[in-house]
């Protein structure tokens, strides 16, 4: 009785082994990693360097220059204010480094002019406070002879600087990483966060917008940001755009060829040509939107003798095939592919034996890579060679499927050893009965 059970188990193991080996021969068509053309290899990430973030900040002029929406404090004795009355004093708001201002509030209009009593509008846009005061004095004394020269008292100060309101939409600051679950899924919950920021004149640039909205983009953000300009300024279009972003759908029409979109890289390779953006590109005006997108799709997948799951790729450093196995729960030290318990669960045509330990560890990796046109190519990696040969340690690209497998010889030895253990167990069971 025991002998027939042993023979039956042996034949079943051999039949399953032949089926597995036959199916494994399809890997013979895979391209060896050392022969991969450079065009199909992943570009290194480790050599990416942050751009000089000073380039995201505009150079302010040495002296503040006036512009539309500035509020001036102007005192002109006998015209704006009487000699027997002190001029009004305006104290700055809290957390402002603006000194107290003197005079009556006069706004700079959208055309860059100010309106004062008894004279036509005076253009002050682009002038400093001192130059504006001289221009007002010239109009009241020399040009229109309203005040006697040398006896006029004119004071021009700045009550409030003009500001620009922009919107910063960040998917990195609220992205929620979903850790590995029992189903083996890993991903990013994409949810946008919009924040309106007011930027003072000569601080209305990308760097100040980032500083006021949480700082530089985090590790879960793409290595670029986008500035959405004029075409999204109308209320209806802007509302639709924000609705799509905040709902996690991404902004429609925000592409590199859109003339209303400026893309600013944040990290580049030293060999790359200089980033093609100017100071005008990073200056923001009313209605502009700074968009920081999450990198939710940069993942790779594992399978075969590794637990099937989705793994996030690091943004700023390289992950090669050996690193991919390590972060997926395998080991590439003493026994490639073996777990921390020293063994590897076996899965194949005979079923799944999670408690079985292979005497010979798996040394073959098949990387299924999708290339241009949607085609998939298999790449074969020998883990024994990869430990000493850098050409075998190819870098993982987003979307790669990493399959850890036994070679046919490893599979035969491991199945044979498991069969010997099974026969020994059945012999002990038969002898006991």
Image: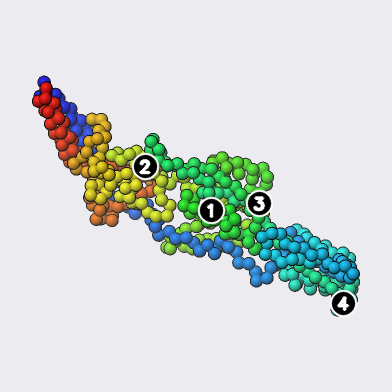
Give the alpha-carbon distance from disc 1 to disc 4, as whole Å: 56 Å
Which numbered disc, 4 or 2, marks the residue that appears first in the sequence? Answer: 4
Q: How crowded is mark 1: few (under 14 residues within 10 Å), some or many (20 or more)?
A: some
Question: Given the current orientation, which residue lies at the most extreme bottom position?
Answer: 150
Rendered location of residue 227, percent (x, y): 58, 53
Disc marking residue 151:
4
Disc marking residue 399:
none
Residue that label 1 marks: 225
Q: Residues within 10 Å of mark 3 (few under 14, many from 20)?
A: many
Q: Is residue 257 left or right of residue 46?
A: right
Give the alpha-carbon distance from disc 3 to disc 2, as whole Å: 41 Å
Give the alpha-carbon distance from disc 1 to disc 2, as whole Å: 27 Å
Q: Quadrant of the N terminus?
A: top left
Q: Which colour scheme is used?
A: rainbow
Question: Which numbered disc, 1 or 4, marks the residue closer to the eye?
Answer: 4
Give the alpha-carbon distance from disc 3 to disc 1, as whole Å: 17 Å
Question: Which numbered disc, 4 or 2, marks the residue closer to the eye?
Answer: 4
Q: Where 133 sits versus 237, above or below?
A: below
Which numbered disc, 3 or 2, marks the residue that appears first in the sequence? Answer: 3
Residue that label 2 marks: 301
Q: Which residue is drawn at 57% across and 59% down?
A: 207
Element type at marker 1?
strand
Q: Is residue 183 left or right of residue 250?
A: left
Q: Residue at x 78, y 69 (%)?
A: 156
């Amino acid at each position: 009785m025991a002998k027939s059970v042993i023979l039956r188990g042996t034949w079943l193991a051999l039949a399953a082994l032949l089926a597995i080996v036959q199916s494994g021969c399809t890997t013979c068509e895979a391209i060896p990693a050392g022969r991969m053309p450079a065009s199909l290899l992943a570009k290194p990430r480790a050599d990416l360097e942050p751009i000089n973030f000073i380039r995201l900040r505009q150079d302010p002029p040495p002296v503040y220059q006036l512009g539309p929406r500035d509020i001036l404090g102007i005192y002109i004795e006998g015209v704006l204010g009487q000699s027997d009355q002190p001029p009004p004093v305006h104290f700055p708001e809290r957390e402002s480094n603006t000194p107290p201002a003197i005079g009556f509030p006069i706004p700079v209009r959208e055309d860059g002019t100010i309106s004062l009593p008894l004279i036509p509008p005076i253009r002050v846009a682009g002038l400093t406070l001192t130059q504006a005061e001289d221009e007002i004095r010239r109009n009241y004394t020399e040009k229109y002879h309203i005040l006697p020269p040398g006896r006029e008292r004119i004071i021009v100060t700045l009550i409030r600087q003009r500001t620009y309101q922009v919107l910063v939409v960040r998917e990195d600051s609220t992205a929620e990483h979903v850790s590995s679950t029992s189903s083996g899924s890993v991903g990013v919950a994409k949810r946008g966060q919009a924040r309106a920021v007011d930027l003072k004149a000569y601080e209305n640039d990308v760097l100040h917008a980032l500083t006021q909205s949480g700082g530089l983009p985090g590790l879960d953000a793409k290595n670029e940001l986008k500035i959405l300009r004029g075409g999204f300024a109308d209320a209806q279009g802007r509302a639709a755009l924000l609705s799509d972003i905040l709902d996690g759908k991404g902004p429609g029409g925000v592409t590199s060829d859109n003339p209303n979109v400026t893309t600013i890289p944040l990290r580049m390779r030293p060999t790359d040509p200089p980033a093609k953006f100017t100071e005008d590109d990073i200056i923001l005006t009313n209605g502009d939107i700074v968009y920081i997108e999450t990198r939710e799709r940069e993942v790779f997948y594992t399978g075969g003798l590794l637990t099937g799951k989705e793994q996030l790729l690091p943004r700023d450093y390289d992950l090669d095939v050996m690193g991919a196995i390590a972060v997926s729960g395998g080991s590439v030290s003493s026994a490639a592919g073996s777990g921390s318990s020293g063994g590897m669960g076996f899965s194949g045509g005979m079923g799944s034996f999670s408690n079985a330990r292979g005497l010979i560890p798996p040394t073959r990796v098949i990387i299924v890579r999708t290339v241009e046109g949607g085609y998939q190519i298999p790449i074969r990696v020998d883990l024994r060679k990869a430990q000493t040969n850098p050409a075998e340690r190819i870098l993982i690209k987003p979307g790669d499927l990493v399959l850890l497998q036994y070679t046919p010889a490893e599979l035969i030895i491991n199945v044979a050893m498991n069969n010997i253990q099974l026969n020994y167990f059945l012999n002990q069971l038969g002898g006991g009965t």
